[in-house]
Image (cartoon, rainbow, N blue to C red):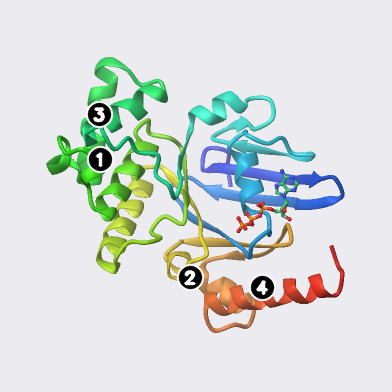
Amino acid sequence: MGPTTSVVRTQALHKQFGSLVAVHSLDLEIRRGEVFGLLGPNGSGKTTTIRMLCGLVLPTSGTAEVAGFDITTDAEKVRRRIGYMSQRYGLYDELTVAENLRFYASVYGLVGKARDVRLAEHVELLGLGERLRQRAGTLSGGWKQRLALACATAHHPDLVFLDEPTAGVDPAARRTFWQTIYDLAQAGTTVLVTTHYMDEAERCQRLAFLSRGHLIGLGTPAEVVQQFGAKTVEDVFVMLQQRDEQAAHGGVS
Ligand SMILES: Nc1ncnc2c1ncn2[C@@H]1O[C@H](COP(=O)(O)OP(=O)(O)OP(=O)(O)O)[C@@H](O)[C@H]1O
């Protein structure tokens, strides 16, 4: 896989907090335009991995490149090339949809005509045209989510992180939202999803399973299920959780 097709590339990426190994020597590549899921039980190292990939936490050892920039030496450039959509959305309720979009685009350094052109394309891609003048606080959950995704990707990042992206919305809105995620990926933004919802996991093109900081499964949902001799992604997840609990009771750190 050449450098042009890889948006995330980690080599022996390692993070310790004192004696606790949160992420253990992680080797991972995520390709441009992929919808990639990072899964694992509580405490398995997902958040720490993402914080390192965002340039917010320094690794103890190992390296990672995001969008071609080193997370340790070029963290500022990394941060300009990524977007993040949290479960809390970070929208300004008193501002309209258009104002929220303009605000986020400006924060990420887009200004003037370039910003207007970019936002017009983006509004079209995310289907927000009919809501531009509505205040964000009055939108339904599904529309808020779509606006939050639009804000996180207004600057056309190479990579966007989505944390449990469709938690708390109805099935129809979920389906529409996932279609938007695929559209974004198709348009060149790589999507990294962390989730505990197995229906979301199954919609990802590839998955990485972490357990106690170790990468222990990698592939398409079907491949991962096969690797573990399981029937569903949920079975894999439950299996890992039980394994973690047994290890914890056995006193393994
Ligand atoms: N700043 C920190 N200081 C000390 N330990 C930490 C710190 N951040 C994370 N940890 C520990 O590192 C391990 C991995 O945590 P992390 O938050 O990355 O897991 P996670 O998979 O994101 O979990 P969750 O699904 O609960 O969010 C845990 O044991 C956690 O307690």
Name the residue rendered at 58%, 47% in the picture. Answer: 1
Q: Find the distance from the CA under tag 4 to the CA under tag 1.
A: 38 Å
Residue that carries the numbered disc 4 in the rendered image: 241
Q: Nearer the viewer, mark 3 or mark 2?
A: 3
Q: Residue at x 53, y 30 (%)?
A: 79
Circle 2 SS class: helix
- Relative to 217, residue 193 above or below: above
Q: Secondary structure at mark 3?
A: helix
Task: Give the spatial CA distance, label 4 vs label 2.
Answer: 14 Å
Comparing 212 with 62, the one in front is 212
> For mark 2, what is the residue?
198
Q: Position of residue 170 (x, y in %)?
A: 29, 66
Residue 103 higher or lower than 223, as above or below:
above
Q: Nearer the viewer, residue 81 or 249?
A: 249
In the picture, the disc for residue 218 is none
Please report whichever mark, 3 or 2, sits nearer to the chain's N-terminal start: 3
- Disc 3 to disc 1: CB gap under 8 Å: no
Query: Residue 191 vs residue 42: left or right?
Result: left
Q: CA distance from mark 2 to mark 1?
A: 29 Å
Crowd band around label 3 with a 10 angstrom C-alpha radius: few (<14), some (14–19), many (20+): some
Q: Position of residue 179 (x, y in %)?
A: 30, 57
Is the Cβ of the residue at disc 4 closer than 8 Å to that at disc 3? no
Q: Quadrant of residue 137?
A: top left
**Circle 1: is it few (<14), some (14-19), or many (20+) Cα within 10 Å?**
many
Mark 3 highlights which residue? 99
The reply to whether the C-beta atoms of the residues labelled 4 and 2 are less than 8 Å apart is: no
Cα–Cα span, label 3 and label 2: 34 Å
- Name the residue: 58% across, 37% down: 54
Cα gap from disc 3 to disc 1, whole angstroms:
9 Å
